[in-house]
Amino acid sequence: MAAAKNMRLLLVEDEPRMANLVARGLREQSYAVDTAPDGDQALYMSAINTYDLIILDLMLPTIDGYQVCGELRRQKIPVPILMLTARDAVEDRVAGLDSGADDYLSKPFDFKELLARVRALLRRAQEVRPPSITVDDLVLNTANHTVKRAGREISLTAKEYALLEFFVIRNGQLLGRQEIAEHVWDENFDPMSNVIDVYVKRLRRKIDDGFRIPLIHTRRGEGYIFSPDHSPDKGNALV
């Protein structure tokens, strides 16, 4: 099972081939990845979206990575930033960190090292949470990404786990399809697609069918609520 869960990243890279390779590799690890080809677009996307981490190339058209990083920090956007550059001089690394970057990786790099840096920054930035989260008789282990219900282990795909973890962390909240798409998928998600409904149906079949209390509820026209309390809310029945 892939290691990444529920994380949305912004990759800022002007070289299309590099951007495609890195984005594809990250998506294979179940990260949701948006891409920006220049500094202006990176600032725009950071203003309208919430990211868990930004991978920022130093040499960019319009405005460079130093300026992007500095502007994000001036705007009080606390997202972790991993800076990428072909420059390997100590002065460049220091300048990157001084502009507000959290880590620095020189090109060319091994993709495994990139993943390790990404995981480390995400762990550092994540809110402290227990190694397992329990909702009714469902136990989600956030350390090894296993799921049990009533003591029975449930096998999930990487994307199913990502969706379930998003539900569990937001237990009791109404989650619309757009919010789910932004956190579990990425900007390439087709809003007209029924993919979310398909995954919710699969997840419901695995964690609800055959158990005493359903946990996933649909509010027609609005979205989903993950909760052992399936009573009607504000006049709209949960199903």
Image (cartoon, rainbow, N blue to C red):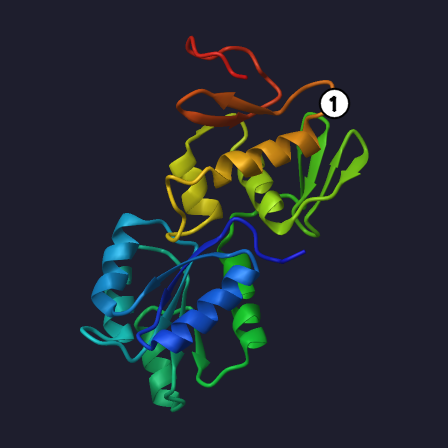
Q: Residue, x 64% and y 43% (percent of image)?
A: 130
Q: Amino acid at mark 1?
A: Phe
Residue 83 in view: no
Return the x and y of residue 190 as percentages of the image width and height: 39, 46
Q: Residue, x 48% and y 56% (percent of image)?
A: 125
Q: Residue, x 34% and y 85% (percent of image)?
A: 92
Residue closer to the observer: 105 or 157: 157
Count of all numbered marks drawn on residues in the image: 1
**Residue extending farthest top:** 235
Q: Is residue 26 above or below residue 13?
A: above
Q: Is residue 212 above or below residue 2?
A: above
Residue 163 in view: yes
Image quarter of the N terminus = bottom right
Residue closer to the observer: 72 or 185: 185
Q: Is residue 233 left or right of residue 59?
A: right
**Residue extending farthest front:** 193
**Residue extending farthest right:** 151
Q: Is residue 198 left or right of residue 101?
A: right
Return the x and y of residue 156 as percentages of the image width and height: 68, 44
Image quadrant in which you'd find residue 73? bottom left
**According to the image, label 1 marks what residue?**
211
Image quarter of the C terminus = top right
SS class, disc 1 = loop
Q: Residue, x 58% and y 35% (percent of image)?
A: 168
Q: Is residue 41 above or below residue 180?
A: below
Return the x and y of residue 65 as percentages of the image width and height: 29, 74
